[in-house]
Image: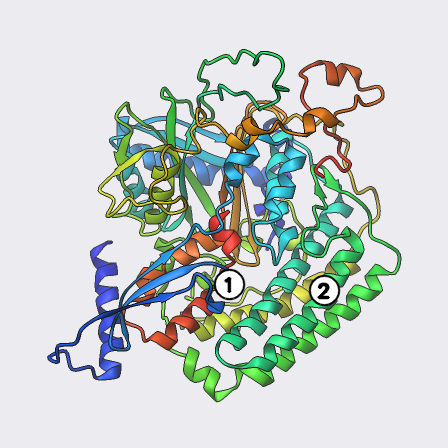
C-alpha cells in the first residue's frame, strides 16, 4: 500500500475511533466474530472473519471459494457456443448481461458483427437484466437494514421484468439467448407493448422505494457516512460500477468505452455521487434502474427491422488471436479475455468479474467500523457470490 | 456518448474509418511514453483486435512497468491480473472416447499477441479512466516461476495474485501473503496449468462425444476433426 493510501487509511480509522470516543487506555480483550458463510448479508456463501475490539472491527478477512466452479478450466474443454451456458451462471441475477461480453469478444476475433436489429434487442435485454438485478438489490439492502416491506416489493416488481425476459428467451434466470453473430430468436408478438408497461411499473417501483427507504431516517442514519471509500482507493482496488461512481469517479463503460451495443445512440445520464459512502452507492443504483428503464423504452422505439443473425458458419471456429471485451454489467465492469488458437473452443478464458475486485476492498473498508455497519457495507458494495467465485 | 469512440465496428485495419486512427494515436502515444520510460525493458508491443494495446516487458521490469503505467500514463484503475499457460494440453480437448488410444498432441509452445519465450506468461490490464484507453501488459515468467508483485502499486492486485499463485503456481515476490483463495488449504496442484487433468472428464467421457450426429451436408466439416459438431442453433444446450 502506498504512503498516500496509508495516510488515507489512518485518517479513516481515526475518524471512526473518534466517533465512538473509545478510550484506548482501557485494556480490552479482542474477540473474533465469524459472519457467514450462511449469513443473509453475504448474498450466498461469503464468510467474513472479523477481529473485534468491543464493537469496533480491528481487522476483517473475507473468505471466498465456497462456490468455486472452475469456469476458466471448464471453458477450455467446451466449444464457444457451450461457454455461454457456463457464464450465464456467474451473476445469476442478471444472467443475460454475462453472455454479452463473451459473445462480443468471440465476434471480434471472428470479425463478425451482429445485425443492427440484434444489437438493439441485445441492448434492451442487457438493460433489462440490469433492472432485474438492481431491483432485487433495492429490496435486499432494505431488508438487511431491517425494512422487510421493501424486500417484498423488490421480489414482486422483479417479476415484471423476468416475465418479459422469459417471454423472449424462454428462460427466467439463464436465458442462454445470445449467439455469436446475433440472437437466437426475434421478439414475440405483442412483447414491445408489454415491456413498455413493465418499464412503467419499474419506474413506479423506484418512486415507491424512494418514499419508503431512501428518505427514511433510520436508513439514512445507517448508511450516510458509513463505509466511505475515496476515489483513489476505489481505483487502486479496481472497483467498478456503482461502487466506483459512488466514490465520485465519473466512469461508465457504456459511455466511455462502448463495445458492440447501441448505448452511444441512446439518451441517458451517468450518475455519480461525491460522498463514497453506503448511501451514495444505494442512490446511484436507484438512479440506474430509472435510466435503464428509459433506455429499454428507447431501444424499443428505435428498433430497426432486418435480420437478427449475421452469416456465421454452422460449426464455429474462432481464428487464432486474443481479444478483451468489457461491458458495464449490473454489478460493475465485466470482461472476458479470450485466447483462441483457431480451435472450436477457447484456449484460455480469463473472466474478469466485477464482484471479485469489489469484495477485495473489504479488509480496507471494514477496518475501524462497528459491527452493525458491516452489514450496511456488505449490502451496499453489492456482490453476487457466483460473480466472486466463478 | 459519441459514436466515434466505438471500437467494435472496426472491420479491418485497411478500411478502418477515420475515428479509429484517432484512437490509434492515443494508444501509440501511450506506447511511446512507456518505451521512453522503460527503454530496453519493452520487448514487444502490438495494437491488435478491438483496438487494444499489448506491451510485453521483461519480468524484472514487471513492477516498474506497472508503476510507469500508473504514474506516467494515468492508468490508475486496476482491471485484472492473471497468467497463461501456453503448453498445449497433453489431454487434447478430452474428445477421446476412452477406447481408442489418445491422440498425439504437438507439444510445441506457440505464444500469442506480443510474442513470448516461456511457457508461462503473466498479464494484467490497467485503464486510464479519463479516456477509457486500456493497456494490457505481459511478461514472460522465468524458470523459477517468480515475478515481482504488483501489490505495492495497485492494491487490487492482492487477490488477483493470490488467485494466479494458486491456479498456476507462480510466486509473486513481495506479496504480503500468498494464501489459497478458492481451493481448500491442503489442495495440491495448480488447476489452470494445462498438464493438470480435468478429472471429471477422465472419470466419465464427455457425453457430447456420443451424441454427435453428422449434420446434413456438413460431412466435410465433421470429417476435419472428430469434434462435436456445433451449430449456431441450440448447440449450447
Taking the image as drawn, is residue B37 in sight? no
Q: Which corner quadrant of the image does residue A182 belong to?
A: top right
At 37% from the left and 62% from the top, the residue drawn is A48
Q: Which residue is mark 2?
A: A161
Residue A384 in the image, given as x and y percentages of width and height: 52, 58
Chain letter for mark 2, please.
Answer: A
Do residues under tags 2 and 1 come within 8 Å of each other at their CB atoms? Answer: no
- According to the picture, the residue beneath numbered tag 1 turns out to be A43
Identify the secondary structure beneath mark 1.
loop
Relative depth, front residue between A317 and A369: A369
Placement of A132 over or under A138, stated as above or below: above
Q: Relative to residue A185, is residue A77 depicted above or below?
A: above
The N terminus of chain A lies in quadrant: bottom left
Q: In the rendered view, does A95 fall on the left or right side of A373?
A: right
Name the secondary structure under disc 2.
helix
First along the sequence among labels 2 and 1? 1
Q: Residue at x 64, y 45 (%)?
A: A260
Residue A101: name its quadrant: top right
Q: Residue at x 66, y 36 (%)?
A: A82
Q: How many circles with numbers are drawn on the protein?
A: 2
Q: Position of residue A226 (x, y in %)?
A: 37, 75
Residue A59 quadrant:
bottom left
Asked whether residue B155 appears in the rendered view, the answer is: yes
Residue B164 tag number: none
Q: Position of residue A300 (x, y in %)?
A: 78, 59
Between the C-alphas of marks 2 and 1, the distance is: 21 Å
Q: Residue at the far bottom: name it.
A: A217
Amino acid at each position: 500500500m502506498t504512503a498516500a493510501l496509508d495516510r488515507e487509511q489512518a485518517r479513516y480509522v481515526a475518524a471512526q475511533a473518534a466517533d465512538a470516543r473509545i478510550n484506548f487506555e482501557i485494556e480490552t480483550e479482542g474477540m473474533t466474530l465469524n459472519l457467514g458463510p450462511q449469513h443473509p448479508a453475504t448474498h450466498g456463501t461469503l464468510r467474513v472473519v472479523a477481529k473485534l475490539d468491543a464493537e469496533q472491527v480491528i481487522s476483517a478477512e473475507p473468505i471466498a471459494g465456497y462456490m468455486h466452479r472452475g469456469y476458466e478450466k471448464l471453458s477450455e474443454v467446451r466449444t464457444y457456443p457451450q461457454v455461454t451456458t457456463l457464464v450465464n451462471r456467474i451473476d445469476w441475477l442478471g444472467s443475460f448481461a454475462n453472455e454479452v461480453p463473451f459473445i462480443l469478444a468471440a465476434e471480434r476475433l471472428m470479425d463478425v458483427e451482429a445485425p443492427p436489429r440484434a444489437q438493439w434487442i441485445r441492448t434492451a435485454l442487457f438493460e433489462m437484466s440490469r433492472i432485474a438485478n438492481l431491483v432485487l438489490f433495492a429490496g435486499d439492502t432494505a431488508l438487511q437494514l431491517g425494512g422487510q416491506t421493501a424486500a417484498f416489493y423488490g421480489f414482486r416488481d422483479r417479476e415484471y421484468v423476468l416475465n418479459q425476459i422469459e417471454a423472449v428467451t424462454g428462460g427466467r434466470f439463464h436465458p442462454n439467448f445470445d449467439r455469436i453473430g446475433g440472437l437466437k430468436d426475434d421478439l414475440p408478438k405483442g412483447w414491445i407493448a408489454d415491456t413498455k408497461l413493465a418499464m412503467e411499473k419499474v419506474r413506479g417501483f423506484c418512486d415507491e422505494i424512494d418514499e419508503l427507504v431512501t428518505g427514511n431516517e433510520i436508513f439514512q442514519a445507517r448508511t450516510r457516512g458509513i463505509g466511505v471509500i475515496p476515489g483513489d482507493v476505489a481505483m487502486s482496488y479496481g472497483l467498478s460500477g456503482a461502487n466506483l461512481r459512488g466514490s465520485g469517479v465519473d466512469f461508465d463503460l457504456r459511455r466511455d468505452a462502448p463495445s458492440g451495443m447501441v448505448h452511444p445512440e441512446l439518451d441517458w445520464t451517468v450518475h455519480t455521487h461525491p460522498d463514497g459512502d453506503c448511501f451514495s452507492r444505494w442512490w446511484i443504483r436507484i438512479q440506474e434502474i430509472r435510466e435503464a428503464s428509459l433506455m429499454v423504452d428507447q431501444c424499443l422505439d428505435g428498433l430497426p427491422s432486418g435480420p437478427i443473425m449475421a452469416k456465421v458458419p454452422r460449426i464455429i471456429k474462432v481464428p487464432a488471436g486474443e481479444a478483451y471485451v468489457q461491458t458495464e454489467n449490473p454489478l460493475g465492469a465485466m470482461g472476458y479475455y479470450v485466447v483462441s488458437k483457431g480451435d472450436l473452443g477457447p484456449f484460455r478464458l480469463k473472466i474478469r468479474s466485477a464482484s471479485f475486485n469489489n469484495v477485495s476492498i473489504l479488509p480496507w473498508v471494514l477496518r475501524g467500523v462497528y459491527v452493525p455497519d458491516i452489514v450496511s457495507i456488505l449490502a451496499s458494495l453489492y456482490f453476487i457470490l457466483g460473480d466472486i467465485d466463478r | 456518448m459519441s459514436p466515434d469512440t466505438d471500437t467494435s465496428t472496426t472491420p479491418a485495419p485497411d478500411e478502418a474509418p477515420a475515428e479509429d486512427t484517432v484512437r490509434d494515436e492515443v494508444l501509440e502515444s501511450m506506447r511511446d511514453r512507456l518505451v521512453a520510460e522503460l527503454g530496453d525493458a519493452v520487448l514487444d508491443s502490438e495494437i491488435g483486435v478491438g483496438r487494444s494495446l499489448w506491451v510485453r516487458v521483461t519480468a524484472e521490469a514487471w513492477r516498474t512497468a506497472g508503476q510507469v503505467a500508473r504514474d506516467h500514463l494515468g492508468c490508475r484503475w486496476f482491471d485484472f491480473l492473471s497468467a497463461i499457460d501456453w503448453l498445449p494440453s497433453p489431454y487434447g480437448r478430452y474428445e477421446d472416447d476412452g477406447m481408442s488410444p489418445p491422440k498425439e498432441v504437438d507439444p510445441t509452445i506457440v505464444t500469442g499477441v506480443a510474442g513470448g519465450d516461456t511457457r508461462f506468461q503473466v498479464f494484467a490490464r490497467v485503464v486510464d479512466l479519463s479516456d477509457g484507453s486500456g493497456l494490457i501488459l505481459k511478461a514472460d515468467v522465468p524458470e523459477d516461476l517468480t515475478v515481482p508483485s504488483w501489490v505495492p502499486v495497485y492494491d487490487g492486485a492482492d487477490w488477483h495474485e493470490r488467485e494466479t499463485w494458486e491456479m498456476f503456481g507462480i510466486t509473486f515476490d513481495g506479496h504480503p501473503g500468498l494464501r489459497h483463495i478458492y481451493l481448500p488449504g491442503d489442495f495440491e496442484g495448480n488447476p489452470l496449468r494445462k498438464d493438470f487433468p480435468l478429472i471429471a472428464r477422465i472419470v466419465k467421457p464427455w457425453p457430447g462425444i456420443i451424441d454427435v450426429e453428422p449434420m446434413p451436408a456438413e460431412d466435410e466439416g465433421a470429417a476435419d476433426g472428430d469434434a462435436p459438431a456445433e451449430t449456431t442453433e441450440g448447440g449450447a444446450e
